[in-house]
Image (cartoon, rainbow, N blue to C red):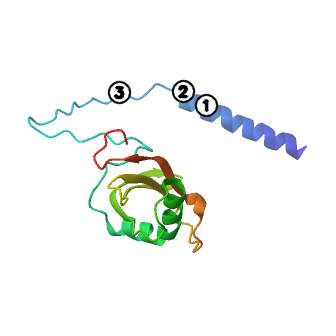
Amino acid sequence: MQTKTIFLLITTIVMVLIETSQSAPAAPKDKVAIVPEQGAAKKPVKVGGGRTEWKTKIDGKSKKLFDKHEKIVSKKIHDVHKIQLKTKLKPAKVASQIVSGVLYHYLVELPTKQYAYVTIHSQPWKKSKVLNEQHVTVRPKLYDLNDKNI
């Protein structure tokens, strides 16, 4: 008996809420047009999941992440591009992309004056001290520093 009473009470409340929400809609608000100023520089539109522009100035956070993964990066670049393991690698450009974490894209200068494309996936909220090789990828193609096809 109590179950039927509770069911009827909930049904009645839902019906009342539906009827009140179907009342006359509110008056539409006036739309204000925003006109850009004359000569104002257009800012690039940010796309969700899109990569940032390449920066030649490597910030501290990006440099620290690269240095932390340098052994893995060196090993993977050696495997893919056949350079010496003792070569000191230095990122020349960096970009980032927010995905399920942050992808840091690096152009790493090689002794041949070409650049390897290295991506490091970081999830800063995970406090794991273990470095994972799966978080580092190296593309097989080499690039020039100002290559437009990156």
| Number of residues whose C-alpha sits closer than 10 Å to that of mark 3, classed few (under 14), some (14–19) or many (20 or more) | few
> In the displayed structure, does residue 60 sit left or right of residue 100?
left
Q: Is residue 122 visible?
A: no
Disc ID at residue 28: 3
Give me the C-alpha separation between circle 1 and circle 2.
6 Å
- Marks 1 and 3 close (CB-CB < 8 Å): no
Check disc 3 and give the amino acid type: Pro
Check disc 2 and give the amino acid type: Gln
- Marks 1 and 2 close (CB-CB < 8 Å): yes
Disc ID at residue 18: 1
Secondary-structure class at tag 1: helix
| Number of residues whose C-alpha sits closer than 10 Å to that of mark 2, classed few (under 14), some (14–19) or many (20 or more) | few
Q: Quadrant of the C terminus?
A: top left
**What number of labels is visible?**
3
Give me the C-alpha separation between circle 1 and circle 3.
21 Å
| Number of residues whose C-alpha sits closer than 10 Å to that of mark 1, classed few (under 14), some (14–19) or many (20 or more) | few
Secondary-structure class at tag 3: loop
Disc ID at residue 97: none
Up-down: is 96 above or below 127? Answer: above
Residue found 41% across the figure and 43% down from its top: 50
Residue found 49% across the figure and 63% down from its top: 73
Q: Furthest residue to the top?
A: 24
Disc ID at residue 22: 2
Q: Percent from the top left, x then y, of residue 79?
A: 55, 58
Secondary-structure class at tag 2: loop
Q: Is residue 134 visible?
A: yes
Residue found 20% across the figure and 38% down from its top: 42
Q: Percent from the top left, x then y, of residue 38?
A: 8, 34
